[in-house]
Amino acid sequence: MEEIAPAKINLALHVRAREPDGYHRIETLFAFAEDGDLLRVREGDGLSLEVTGPFAGDLAGERDNLVLRAAAALRARTGTVKGAALTLHKRLPVASGLGGGSADAAAALRLLSRWWEVEAGETTLLEIARPLGADVPACLLGRTCRGEGRGDDLIPVDGSSIAGAPLLIVNPLVPVPTGPVFADWDGVDRGPLGHDTLLGGRNDLEAPAAVIAPPIRDVLAALAEGAGVLLSRMSGSGASCFALYGSGAARDVARERIAALHPGWWQLSTRLR
């Protein structure tokens, strides 16, 4: 049995305040690609995880993988004693602003609830997801939604107007840890995220992320140059940036142009769910 862990993008991300506990109050719009990492499960004793794929090496030696934490949390919550041998095919860059680890953990919850045939509805899975990370609940839902608070207070959003939109994600293969980017936010509240459009707003983390990883500016410029761009922006805390297009043809032209000019950059050509 297998489950896709769709890449997460932030259509907008407004940082409203730095809280006394060090966390940040944000308003964001989550959306999800059709493609991402792939998680497979087979019979096994206990819980085990093998990581394969082009970015497996970036997780080598990781002792506290979110997939195993999610699996253990689900097993503890439901009381099952069944095991699982998991294989994560890591297609997305690590620390890239695409919710990779969070999406993988969410995929584990969805996959193992089916595999173990446990009584765990969406409400229960969300309760398990929340302590695993701020993005895990949104990644569990895997559909367009608004996130407030730390990003885990979720409000459903009608994403039908952009569903299926051609999407190009580009990463210069520079890992950008989330913590330092938020720490370097200038503390200026630039206003709330509106409720009237999915393609408005901004990403308040672009400026601090680009200081840590200057190639982000080059990626944003390359995406903005193309014809047919509906929206181009950095996702999350970077370094991945994305563009939505009016047609698949426009996206493909941009992909080929960027690949020719920047062969070392990673790209994912896909669509919004």
Image: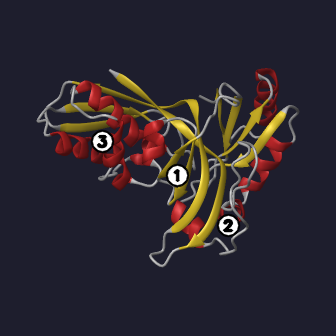
Please identify the quarter of the rendering in which residue 251 is found: top right
Color theme of the render: secondary structure
Mark 3, Cα crowd under 10 Å, few <14 / some 14-19 / many 20+, is few
Q: Residues under labels 2 and 1: Cα distance?
A: 15 Å
- Mark 2 / mark 1, whichever is N-terminal: 1
Tell me the mark number nearer the camera, choosing from 3 and 1.
3
Reading the image, the residue beneath label 3 is 124
Q: Position of residue 243 (x, y in %)?
A: 74, 39
Can see residue 236?
Answer: no
Q: Is the C-beta separation of discs 2 and 1 under 8 Å? A: no
Q: Is the C-beta separation of discs 3 and 2 under 8 Å? A: no
Residue 111 horizontal side relative to residue 231, left or right: left
Q: Position of residue 254 (x, y in %)?
A: 80, 31
Mark 1, Cα crowd under 10 Å, few <14 / some 14-19 / many 20+, is many
- Mark 3 / mark 1, whichever is N-terminal: 1
**Callout 1 secondary element:** loop
Reading the image, the residue beneath label 2 is 208
- For the C terminus, give its image quadrant: top right
Tell me the mark number nearer the camera, choosing from 2 and 1.
2
**Residue 17, relative to residue 169: is it above or below?**
below
Tell me the mark number nearer the camera, choosing from 3 and 2.
3
The amino acid type found where label 2 is placed reads Pro
Reading the image, the residue beneath label 1 is 95
The amino acid type found where label 3 is placed reads Thr
Q: Residues under labels 3 and 2: Cα distance?
A: 36 Å
Name the residue nearer the viewer: 194 or 4.
194
Can see residue 154?
Answer: yes
